[in-house]
Amino acid sequence: MGNIIETKNLSKSFHDPVEFQALKNINVSIKQGEFAAIVGSSGSGKSTLLYVLSTLDTDYTGHIFFDGDDLSLKSKNDLAEIRNEKIGFVFQFHYLLPEFTVLENVCLPALKLAKYSEAEIRERAYQKLDLLGLRDQALKKANKLSGGQQQRVAIARALINDPKIIFGDEPTGNLDSKNSENVFEIFKELKEKYNQSIVVVTHDMSFAERTDRIITLSDGEVVSQ
Amino acid sequence: MIQKTPVIRIALTHLLAKKRQTIVAMLGVTFGIAIFIFQAGLMSGFQAYFIDETVNTTANIRIYNEAEKNRKSILAKRDTASSKWIVVQNQKPKDELNKVKNGYQIIAALEKDSRVSGVSPFLGSQAIFKVGIAQIAGRVSGVDIIKENILFDVSKNMRQGDITKLQTIPNGIILGDGLADLLGAKMHDNISITSPLGVTLEMKIVGINHSGLTEVDKSRAYINIRNAQKLLKVDGSYITDINIKLKDFNQAEELAKFYHQKFGFKTVDWKEANASVFSVFKIQNMVTYLIIASILIVSGFGIFNILMMIIYEKMPDIAILKAIGYKDSDIKKIFLTESLIIGVLGGLLGLIIGFLMQKIAGSIRMDIKGFVSMEYLRFNTSPAFYLFAYIFGLVATSIAGYIPARKAAKMDAIDIIRSK
């Protein structure tokens, strides 16, 4: 009960430059409120799995059920709406728009969703920045912040629409150990306080070991979960 | 601070981040539109002026009689049924008159026609004009000057003298200004004209006329139709042409056909009479618009170029916007907005510069004497023309912007994220 994501016989192949099966018959499920880590050596298909699960990659066979919906039946625009409303992303690189302020960056997904008024969106953005200890940085340009701060802004942006799940693709990959620890604490707090589902791809075993669950991939197959 | 439509905000940010290139792309459009306004404005202004002048100097419809040059021999006419060979050598055209028979009755009938606003009889002849030893070959137009004035507004073009003098002074003549210059003749001078039949009349200059069409002004003189009849040794009912002015000159073509059937004489409408000029216009317009189109294509490349630069530089932005739920169409909108901003601002500046170029060039005294004579360049300054130029520019910029915009929309977020 309460599976936010469930896959059935999920496979994916790359055809270029040579035929290569990146994911083989994957059957995994992520529960609501679960904090899971996907690990594996490089080339094991862990990032590929994350992109497929997070609807960014649609070139797969099998089924993914997200919040009860079969994603293989959705159009590109439907998937964009799902990402906007229900998914938050934190990548290795922060991907903030450099010319925009911190506050504006955090607001971007909410302005697209347009569920709240502009004033409310701004209020909510401040709440998320508070959560991450960045309220005083709100009006600075995004490119004026330190690497650790930028990654926390990216997390605030991922949270703005209260997503069902957050996907992290090596979220601590560019950070020093102190900032990595910081990001981990934030994820943990989100999970514990707000029952936030989080799936993180990482090669940092010390990070992975402290999550609820480790999904290990090898050569495109799930070897333990 | 934050705008409801992040799309426009992002577009503006992109352009501001590349100020110099944006301005160059904008100036490309500005230049294109300004040239459009100037060049096409000059062309269409000139053509409108020329058509105006021709409509004023050519009859909407002209009815005339043409002598049959290739008539059948009398023998051939008699033996129509037989299959005999009939050869008549060295046959001359019949000494037939180019007279419009019952011309004055036809005129009376036409004057009752509700679609007609003026009818004028005409008898033309070649003539040699002589003042002292100066001799010029030209044409005399024998007219009823009052009726002619209704058709061609002769009085408006009088440089000196008065058209009514042609009625009141029995041997009055009105010369074209070019002709008067060539002869060295002035108002009230005496002048002699000699017809091809050898008849010479002594005339007195009662007016100098300037129609605006250089060729006409260099060769034509108005005289009373009675004097023309004297020159050609014909009777008082003899006329060669009937010129008609219509209430709506666009009806000329169909009415010309109608009168041809009704009266049996040849008819020609003003468009047909000036067909060669209109075909020159067509080529002229084609060349003009080709030049303008190529300028706008070049400015299109400028826009294309800057957008491609922005897209490659902002690939991470495109990736994250797609990841957080912006649709392909939103991404397309961002870059289309950028090209439109360039087009709208560059175009507006182009309209202003084009307008100023027209004003400046239009205020310089040129005294052009060619096809037509004008003191100043004439431009098409109608708002519709400006609007057309602007829309043309916007269409060109949106096409130039559409290709990069589509490319950006099609970019794959994962490819960008993976390559980071």
Image (cartoon, rainbow, N blue to C red):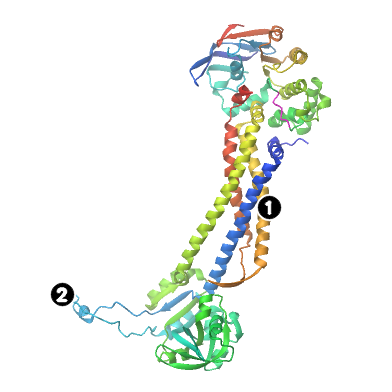
Nearer mark to the viewer, of 1 and 2 = 1
Residue drawn at x 55%, y 52% is B293
Is A113 on the left-hand or right-hand side of B86? right
Which residue, given by chain and number where applicable, does mark 1 sit on? Answer: B349
Label ID, residue B274: none
Q: Which residue type does callout 2 highlight?
A: Lys
B49 versus B108 height, above or below: above
- Segment colored magenta: A94-98
Q: Residue furthest front?
A: B133
B310 versus A170 height, above or below: below
The chain ID associated with circle 1 is B
Is B276 on the left-hand or right-hand side of B328? left
Residue drawn at x 38%, y 84% is B101
The chain ID associated with circle 2 is B
Q: Nearer the viewer, residue A209 or A53?
A: A209
Which residue, given by chain and number where applicable, does mark 2 sit on? Answer: B84
- Sequence-first disc among 1 and 2: 2
Badge 2 density bin: few <14, some 14–19, many ≥20, Cα 10 Å: few
Q: Nearer the viewer, residue B92 or B367?
A: B367
Badge 1 density bin: few <14, some 14–19, many ≥20, Cα 10 Å: some
Q: Which residue type does callout 1 highlight?
A: Leu
Q: SS of the residue at dot 1?
A: helix
